[in-house]
Image: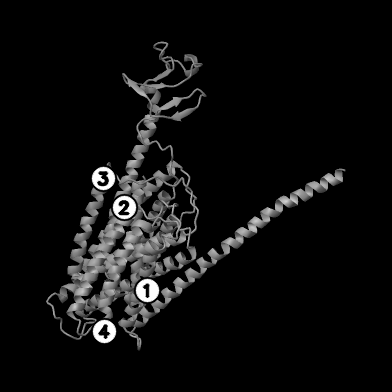
């Protein structure tokens, strides 16, 4: 009998385990198509990107049979495909798509969308300059050079609209098609970003070669792409000069767009928790010191940039003076930034809060971009350090280059820690942000937050139901029974809430310091973004690295690494704005 019962129990347990196994098997089979779609779409995107990079490389080295017409035609085709997909997503699929309820609150923040809109507006100005330039030289330019800015204008307008209203979407239907459409959009923007970098780098390199020719360096060949006909308008020179001053903004626009689209791609089919972070609000209160110091750095940066561009390449003495001035300025700013970031890290560590371990694609991408884009300036800095150590002769400004390069490495390291520490901190639901916190006592002797309280003669009265409590239960001097009607009121004097007030005052003081640090670092990163973006690049002009590594190899290293360094400063500024708002 016992054996029969044992067999019955075993058979019933087998029957219970079987459906679980089937359910797991079904779940795996159900997830296979989506996993395959993710892998296939990513490989498709990489192939699109690599084909475009190869075309850019062939055009840059003047490969036989490859012209700018081929490159622009490829980019126009990619933009048109993305336009068709975005229009389908916005209009054509709404009749069949389930209504999107899930939203990722970490993605597509309002301030980020406002930033990308600003860059997009300047990009539209750039496109209008290109259209005007094409009209002036239409007799000898390919028609693709006129079609490209028109297509790019339409692409920019629709993409900004798409990101404003759909950046937070978590797509749960048409997932396979959406994966290919979004990854196509990501790599289209990356190719447009790379094309902008290539065009601007060629312009910067030509300006550097002109300065070297002025200083008497022989065997320097220029690589100019000027039209072979005369301009039919008197403003062609304005258009040609203005285009290169606007390229830094369109470069930032495309890299920001690609990151937002990538987060949208990663969110396809994702299940999110509903207890996500609270809304971020910007308040300008209490950041006077950080703002004033940051604005002082920004003003100084503009002055240094103007003097540098005027003096560099005029003569050997003026070039050395400009380089020395830049290095001294940069050393001072980087030292202040390191100090501020270290203070912020110490404050964070003293609070001893736990980190948020939720798998948010937006937060993970922010951290990866910070570290990844730092590698560009780290590569240049280590090259400069190696050149200073290896060089046989050292000009006077070279010894300023050494601490500058070391500080660039240290500052990015510390700043990345500071930003990531704040971004990945858990939000405190019971964060004590007010001067006073009033607690009511329920009839079950539990404490809960409530806004219901009365203030009489600088005392706080908390009403609750506790008929069984007496003065001895609450402590001497804590309860004041005025009459039988007010028997359930607990009156606390200011001494009883002084602990909460002191704790809140300490938190507010720490928070004020962190806000000032974030505001200062935000303005400093914008300040350090301006010089390399607008032509102040001592890595080109000091000549020491070019002697050690050779002209072409070092210029190649700078052209590859500098865009990442420029992007790092803008991305750090946007992350620090988020740090300020969350603090």
Residue 217's place in the image compared with 470, above or below, is: below
Residue 290 percent across, percent down from the top left: 27, 47
Q: Is residue 535 left or right of residue 479?
A: left
Depth check: give the residue in front, 256 or 337: 256
**From this viewpoint, which residue is outermost toward the front?**
95
Residue 221 got which mark? 4
In the picture of the structure, the residue carrying the numbered disc 3 is 289
Q: Earlier in the sequence, mark 3 or mark 4?
A: 4
Residue 521 in view of the camera: yes
Residue at the disc numbered 2? 521
Q: Please state the horizontal and vertical placement of residue 382, each as a whole percent of the image.
A: 39, 67
Q: CA distance from mark 1 to mark 3?
A: 48 Å
Mark with earlier residue (4, 2): 4
Per the model, the C-alpha gap separating discs 2 and 1 is: 38 Å
- Disc on res. 78: 1
Mark 1 vs 3, N-terminal side:
1
Horizontal placement of 342 versus 179: left or right? left
* Occupied quadrant, residue 510: top left
- Residue at x-position 42% and y-position 11%: 484
């Amino acid at each position: 009998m016992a054996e029969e019962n044992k067999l019955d129990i075993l058979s019933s347990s087998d029957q219970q385990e079987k459906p679980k196994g089937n359910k797991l098997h079904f779940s795996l089979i159900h997830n296979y198509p989506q996993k395959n779609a993710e892998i296939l779409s990513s490989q498709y995107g990489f192939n699109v990107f690599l084909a475009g990079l190869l075309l850019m490389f062939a055009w840059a080295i003047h490969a036989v049979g490859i012209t700018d017409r081929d490159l622009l035609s490829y980019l126009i085709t990619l933009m048109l495909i993305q336009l068709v997909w975005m229009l389908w997503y916005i209009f054509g699929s709404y009749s069949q798509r389930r209504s999107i309820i899930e939203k990722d609150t970490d993605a597509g923040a309002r301030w980020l969308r406002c930033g990308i809109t600003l860059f997009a507006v300047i990009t539209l100005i750039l496109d209008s300059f290109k259209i005007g330039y094409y009209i002036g030289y239409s007799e000898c330019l390919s028609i693709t050079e006129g079609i490209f800015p028109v297509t790019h204008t339409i692409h920019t307008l629709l993409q900004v609209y798409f990101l404003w209203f759909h950046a937070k979407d978590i797509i749960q239907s048409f997932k396979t098609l959406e994966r290919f459409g979004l990854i196509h959009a990501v790599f289209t923007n990356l190719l447009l970003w790379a094309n902008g970098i290539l065009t601007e780098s060629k312009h910067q390199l030509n300006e550097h070669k002109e300065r070297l020719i002025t200083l008497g360096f022989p065997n320097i060949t220029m690589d100019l792409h000027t039209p072979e006909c005369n301009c039919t308008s008197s403003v062609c020179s304005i258009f040609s000069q203005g285009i290169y001053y606007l390229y830094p903004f369109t470069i930032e626009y495309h890299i920001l767009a690609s990151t937002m689209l990538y987060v949208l791609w990663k969110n396809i089919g994702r299940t999110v928790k509903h207890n996500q972070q609270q809304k971020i609000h910007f308040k300008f209160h209490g950041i006077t010191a950080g703002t004033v110091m940051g604005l002082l750095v920004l003003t100084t940066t503009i002055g240094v940039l103007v003097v540098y561009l005027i003096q560099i390449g005029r003569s050997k003495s003026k070039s050395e003076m400009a380089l020395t001035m830049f290095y001294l300025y940069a050393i001072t700013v980087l030292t202040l930034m390191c100090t501020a970031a270290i203070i912020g890290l110490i404050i964070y560590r003293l609070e001893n809060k736990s980190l948020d371990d939720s798998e948010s694609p937006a937060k993970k991408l922010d951290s990866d971009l910070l570290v990844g884009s730092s590698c560009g300036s780290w590569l240049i800095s280590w090259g400069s350090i190696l050149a200073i150590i290896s060089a046989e002769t050292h000009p006077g400004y070279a010894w300023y280059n050494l601490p500058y390069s070391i500080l660039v490495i240290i500052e990015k390291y510390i700043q990345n820690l500071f930003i990531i520490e704040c971004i990945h901190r858990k939000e405190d639901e019971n964060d004590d942000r007010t001067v006073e916190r009033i607690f009511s006592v329920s009839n079950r002797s539990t404490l809960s937050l409530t806004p219901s309280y009365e203030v009489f003669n600088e005392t706080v009265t908390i009403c609750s139901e506790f008929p069984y409590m007496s003065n001895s239960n609450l402590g001497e001097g804590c309860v004041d029974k005025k009459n039988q009607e007010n028997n359930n009121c607990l009156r606390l004097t200011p001494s009883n809430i002084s602990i909460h007030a002191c704790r809140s005052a300490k938190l507010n003081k720490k928070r004020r310091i962190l806000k000032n640090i974030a505001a200062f670092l935000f303005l400093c990163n914008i300040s350090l973004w301006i010089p390399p973006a607008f032509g102040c690049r001592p890595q080109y002009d000091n000549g020491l690295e070019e002697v050690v590594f050779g002209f072409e190899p070092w210029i190649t290293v700078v052209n590859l690494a500098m865009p990442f360094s420029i992007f790092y400063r803008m991305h750090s500024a946007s992350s620090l704005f988020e740090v300020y708002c969350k603090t």
